[in-house]
């Protein structure tokens, strides 16, 4: 646990998790101090090593995945947005960027 923080007007615990296989991958998780609800996940990885040929079709130079949640009037938490940015290098040595953004703008409470 890193400590306390404020996120979307909620007091939260901030946790840092590192991968056993890849120490460069870091995941931050934000959990409310009141209800212990997970309200945000932020995962990132960065590498400047462009010299080696990838073992597979591509390998990541940068990876940033972010998901956050919003609490509605019914008290439940829903996905608010997903942001996924990746910069990868393919077997020919070309750098390819992939960026996806999905944002939830309206929730129909009658379809739950």
Image (cartoon, helix red, strand yellow):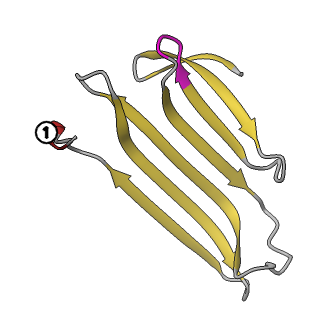
Residue at image position (62%, 66%) is: 87
Q: Categorize mark 1 by other alpha carbons within 10 Å: few (<14), some (14-19), many (20+).
A: few
The part of the chain drawn in magenta is 31-35
Vertical comparison of 100 with 38: above or below: below
Residue 74 is situated, as x and y percent measured from the top left of the image, at: 24, 23
Residue 28 is situated, as x and y percent measured from the top left of the image, at: 63, 35
Residue at image position (29%, 47%) is: 104
Vertical comparison of 69 with 26: above or below: above
Under circle 1, the secondary element is: helix
Residue 47 is situated, as x and y percent measured from the top left of the image, at: 77, 59
Quadrant into which the C terminus falls:
top left
Q: Closest to the observer: 74 or 12?
A: 74
Residue 58 is situated, as x and y percent measured from the top left of the image, at: 69, 77
Residue at image position (43%, 49%) is: 82
Vertical comparison of 52 with 14: above or below: below
Of helix, strand and loop, which mostly describes the magenta segment?
A: loop
């Amino acid at each position: 646990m890193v400590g306390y923080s404020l996120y979307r007007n909620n007091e939260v615990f901030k946790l840092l998790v590192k991968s056993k296989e890849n120490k460069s991958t870091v995941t931050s998780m934000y959990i409310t101090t009141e209800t212990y609800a997970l309200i945000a996940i932020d995962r990132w990885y960065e590498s400047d090593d462009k010299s080696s040929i990838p073992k597979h079709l591509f390998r990541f130079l940068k990876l940033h995945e972010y998901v956050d949640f919003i609490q509605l009037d019914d008290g439940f938490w829903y996905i608010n947005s997903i942001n996924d940015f990746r910069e990868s290098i393919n077997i020919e040595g070309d750098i390819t960027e992939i960026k996806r953004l999905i944002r939830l703008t309206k929730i129909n409470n009658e379809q739950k």
